[in-house]
Structure formats: structure tokens, C-alpha cells
Amino acid sequence: MEKKNLLLLICTVLSFFTVFAVNAVTIVIPSIATEFHMSNIVQNWVTIIFLLVVAVLSVPAGQISGKYGLKRVT
């Protein structure tokens, strides 16, 4: 039962950090846009690219931790 609780805790923390990172990017984008004189379209692309990178890297990270075990990966 201890492994299941650890896995649940890790999933909960990672879910929180994903939402936190997306919100952080959303809050910071106007400052970055002002500094680099970006249009609204470019601002949207930056957010979309960030979300795509997070989504693309989540799958290999899960496969690596599943293949080698959670203790070896962390």
C-alpha cells in the first residue's frame, strides 16, 4: 500500500506543478511581450509551444520511469 500512496503523491504534486507552470507562463507573457515588442499572435504561440513541450516531454519521462523504476530516475 505504501507504493500506491507514493505514486498518488507524486502524481498530485506533478499535476499541481503543471498547472502552476502554465499559470506562471500566462502571467509572465505580457512582460516578455513588452520587452521584445511581440504581437498578440506571437504571445499565443509562445504559450502553445510551452504547452506542447510539456506534453511531449511528459510521455518519455513516464516511459523512462516505468522502464527503470522510479528510484533510479529520481
Image: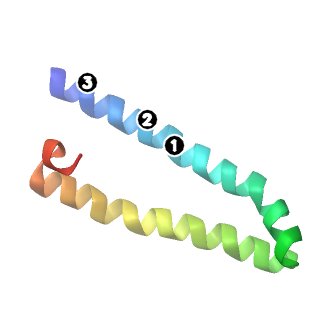
User: Which quadrant would the C terminus be assigned to in this image?
Assistant: top left
Q: Which residue is mark 1?
A: 17
Q: Which residue is mark 2?
A: 13
Residue 57 in the image: above or below residue 13: below
Taking the spot 43% from the left edge, 35% from the top edge, the residue there is: 13
Q: Nearer the viewer, mark 1 or mark 3?
A: 1
Q: Which element carries disc 3, helix, strand or loop?
A: helix
Mark 1 crowdedness (10 Å alpha carbons): few <14, some 14-19, many ≥20? few
Whole-angstrom CA distance, mark 3 to mark 2, is: 12 Å
The disc labelled 3 sits on which kind of residue? Answer: Asn
Mark 2 crowdedness (10 Å alpha carbons): few <14, some 14-19, many ≥20? few
Sequence-wise, which precedes: disc 3 or disc 2?
3
Residue 12 in the image: above or below residue 59: above
Taking the spot 77% from the left edge, 62% from the top edge, the residue there is: 29
User: Left of 30 or right of it: where is 67?
Assistant: left
Taking the spot 68% from the left edge, 49% from the top edge, the residue there is: 23
Q: Which residue is mark 3?
A: 5
User: Left of 73 or right of it: where is 45?
Assistant: right
Name the image quarter holding residue 9. top left
Residue 70 in the image: above or below residue 51: above
Taking the spot 77% from the left edge, 79% from the top edge, the residue there is: 42
Q: Which element carries disc 2, helix, strand or loop?
A: helix
Which numbered marker is on residue 55? none
User: Which quadrant would the N terminus be assigned to in this image?
Assistant: top left
Labels 1 and 3 touching (C-beta < 8 A): no
User: Left of 5 or right of it: where is 15?
Assistant: right
Q: Farthest residue toward the top?
A: 1
Q: Position of residue 33 (x, y in %)?
A: 83, 70
